[in-house]
Image (tube, helix red, strand yellow):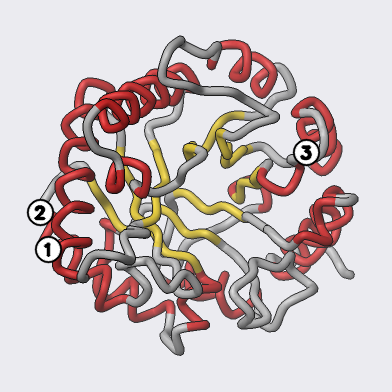
Amino acid sequence: MGTIKREDIANSNIHYRFYPFETFLEKQEELGVRKIDLFGATPHMWIDAYSASDAGEVRRQIEGRGMEVNSFTPEFSSMRYTLGAEGEGERKTWEYVKRFLEFAAGLGTGRIILTANGFLLDRDEKEQRRRLKDSLRHLGELGKPYGFQFLLLNSFSDGTSLIRTKADMEGFLAELSSESFLPAVDTASVYEAGECLEDWFSSFGESLSHVSFNNTKFDGARHYWGDGYLNPVEILEVLKHVGYGKSIGCSFYVRDYLKEPWLADERTGEIISWALGEVSV
């Protein structure tokens, strides 16, 4: 049996995109959050194919408030741009990828979270899989000097994703056959698929390296805890039972949360603390 504390669970800035990054950090500090799952998109940060961005400044802002970067998700969060690019467009795309790797290295995290969605709907699935695997293998080679772990996340609600279920993850990782890539699991997608989280740990064991601890109404969105249908106590009990001690993060993206995102954070913090037996709600 493992022990999980509130400060072990990271929070993402993805739903603060209408507010300055400083506002996000201020609210996380007030809530006692200690780890940040950083979503690398504008307006909070800018990465392009032509110049290096100052990850050091982002890291200083985070660490200055007593927090750390738990993981980094690049803006594209999948390989869809490299899959469709050809010629000069492909060259510029890979230059951008190199820049985001440099940026991630400057953040001080070794975890990069990706989803395996292809978006090549004009190609058959065999061609989608081939190009996706080729792109990921190349990404793995580029990431080796930094020692990154690339964590592939299931995404059930995305019909273009090649990893929607546990069987998809098993098959894709076997085909990819690369030590640079490890499985991650999104709890909302697990239950949307009618699966059990216990089965994921039975299949992947110690290689499962990130849990996206998310709620859902089975509508494809990621709802904050207290506004979805999943039971956080049961999920956390699974994590404790298997002795899980690696990365855990929350990520919400419902448009209503963008107006006053700290309200979602406050409610989520209350529910998680209650589920862990820390406070009464």
**Circle 3: residue type:** Gln
Return the x and y of residue 132 as percentages of the image width and height. Answer: 22, 53
Name the foreground residue: 127 vs 71.
Answer: 127
Does residue 85 lie above or below 155 as drawn? Answer: above
- For residue 174, what is the image quadrant? bottom left
Q: Is 89 placed left or right of 178 in the picture?
A: right
* Marks 3 and 1, how far apart at CA: 38 Å
Q: CA distance from mark 3 to mark 2?
A: 38 Å
Q: Is residue 86 above or below residue 210?
A: above
- Label 1's element? helix
Which quadrant would the C terminus be assigned to in this image?
A: bottom right
Q: What's the residue at 55%, 31% (across, down)?
A: 69
Specify which label sits upstream in the sequence, 3 or 2. Answer: 3
- Give the residue displayed 25% in from the left and 67% down from the top: 204
**Foreground disc of the pair 3, 1:** 1
Whether pointer 2 and pointer 1 mark residues with C-beta atoms closer than 8 Å, the reply is yes
Disc on res. 28? 3
Measure the alpha-carbon separation of dots 2 and 1.
Answer: 5 Å
| Residue 160: quadrant of the picture | bottom left
Disc 3 packing (10 Å; few <14; some 14–19; many ≥20): many
Q: Secondary structure at mark 2?
A: loop
Type of amino acid under label 2 = Ser
Determine the residue positioned at 22% across, 45% down. 136
Instruction: Look at the image and tell me whether residue 71 can be seen.
Output: no
The residue indicated by pointer 2 is 177
According to the image, label 1 marks what residue?
A: 174
First in sequence: mark 3 vs mark 1: 3
Residue 264: percent from the left, percent from the top?
82, 57
Q: Nearer the viewer, residue 11 or 177?
A: 177
**Mark 1 belongs to which amino acid?**
Ala
Residue 50, relative to residue 66: is it above or below? above
